[in-house]
Image (cartoon, rainbow, N blue to C red):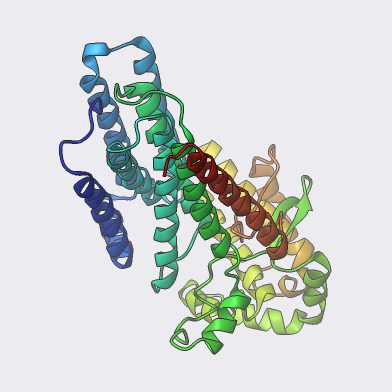
Amino acid sequence: MLDHPPKERAALSWGYVVLWSALTFVTIPFVRYGVTFVKQRWGSEVFTYVVAACVLLAAVSALYATRRRWSLSSFVWLFGIAGLVIYLTFGLAEGNPEEAIHYVQYGVLSLLLFRAFSHRVRDYSIYLAAAIVGTLVGMMDETLQWLVPGRYFDLRDIVLNMKAVVLVQIGIAAGVRPGMISGWPGLVSVRRLCYLSAVMLGYLGLCLQNTPDRIAWYASNVPGLGGIDPDRSIMVEYGYLHGDAANGFFRSRLQVEDLRRASMERADEGRRILDQYRERERYQEFLALYSPLADPFLHEARVHLVRRDSHMRRAANTEQRDRQARYFATAYWENRILQDYFGGVIRGSSYEWSAQNEADVKVAADLSKPYHSAVSKHLIVRFSPVQMALLFTGVVGAFLLGGYACTRALRQRGVG
C-alpha cells in the first residue's frame, strides 16, 4: 500500500483531490438538513459510532496492506493514532457529535493528497506538503460556509480539519511507511514547502482580518457585496478575557468597565427587553434584533442566560449524578457571571434566581475545576487585529524570503 506511485496520471490523481474537495464544498448548504434528519431518525450518537467505525476500519485496512512487512511499531502507530481520533470523536459527543465527520472528510482528503504529491515528491517533505494543502482546503471550506446563509466560519473547525489531515499523514509516515518515500528534502522540496506555507498562512491572515467592521464597510462600499449582512456573516471577532478562578472566566466583546456601565445605565431597558423575549420560541428573533454588532451587551447577556437555563434543564433530565453535577456547575458559574457583570438587567427580571435556588444549585454542583464559559469562546483575546496583521505579515514574509533563497541557490547550481 502506497509503496509505489499511483498507476494513473498525475493529473487524474489531482483530479480526485479536486473532486473530493468540490464534493465537500457543494454539500455545505445541505449539511444541516442532513444532520437534522439523522438526529431525528437515529439520534445524534450515530455520528460518533459511524466515525469511530470508519477510523477502526481504516487502521485495520492499513495494517492488512502492510502485512508483508508488518512490525510492532507499525501496529502501535496505526492503532495509537486510531485510538486518539476515536478519543477526540467521543470528546465531541456531548456538544456537536456531527463535527466528528470532519475526521472522515479530511482524512480521505489527506490520503488523496499524499497520492497526488507522490507522483513527483519522494522525500519526507511530502507529508508536510500534503498537510499544508489539506489545511488550506479546510480554510476554504470554512470561508464558503461563511458565505452560505445559516452556516458559519469557525476557527475551531479549521483546527479540527487540520488535525484530521495531520494525523493521517503521521499514520502514513510512521505506521504505513511507504517504501517509495525516503530521504530528507532538498532545495526544490524546501522551496515548495516555503511557498505553500506562505499561501496557507497568508490566506489565514486575511481571514483573521475580516472583522464585522470591515465586512460592514465593504458591504456598503464595494459593488456586488451589498447582500452580505455584517450581523450574520461574522468571520472573526476580537474581544477580552475576563474573570478569575474564583468566579469563572468568560470572553466578551466589551471591556469590564463597559459591561458594568451598561449594566447600570441600561437596567430598566434591558430588563424589559429580556423579559419580552423570554420564550424559547423567540430566541432567534431576539438574536436577529440584538446581534453582536448591533447590541453586544444585551446579546451576550441573553446567550449567558440561555446557557445557564439549558444546563439547568439538562441537570433535571438526567439521572447520572456526575453528569448532573457538571450541568449544575455550568448553570451556577453562568449565573455568577450574570450577577457580577450583567447584574443590573438581571436583578428584578423574570430571570433572577432566588437566594435559595442559588444555594441549592451550589450544593449540587461540582465546583472543583475552574470554569471557562463557552459563550463567545470564538473571540480572539490574545491579540488585536493590528498585532495579528503584523505577526502574519512577518511570518509570511519569512517563508517567501526562504522560497526566494532556495530559488537563487538552485539557479546558482544550474537547476531551474
Give how far across and how far down residue 169 sits, in percent: 39, 34
Identify the image quadrant of residue 363: top right
Q: Residue at x 43, y 40 (%)?
A: 415
Give how far across and how far down residue 303 sits, in percent: 59, 66
Furthest residue toward left: 7
**Quadrant location, the N terminus:** top left
Residue 81 placement, left or right of 105: right
From the viewer's perspective, is residue 354 above or below residue 293?
above
Residue 253 placement, left or right of 40: right
Between 103 and 259, the one nearer to me in the picture:
103
Identify the image quadrant of residue 166: top left
Give how far across and how far down residue 142 sits, in percent: 43, 60
Give how far across and how far down residue 309 sits, in percent: 57, 61
Question: Can see residue 86?
Answer: no
From the viewer's perspective, is residue 117 above or below residue 64?
below
Q: Residue at x 59, y 53 (%)?
A: 396
Count of all numbered marks drawn on residues in the image:
0
Between 317 and 8, the one nearer to me in the picture:
8
From the viewer's perspective, is residue 111 above or below residue 161?
above
Q: Residue at x 63, y 82 (%)?
A: 273
Q: Residue at x 78, y 66 (%)?
A: 255
Identify the image quadrant of residue 343: bottom right
Question: Can see residue 344?
Answer: yes
Residue 221 placement, left or right of 81: right
**Quadrant location, the C terminus:** top left
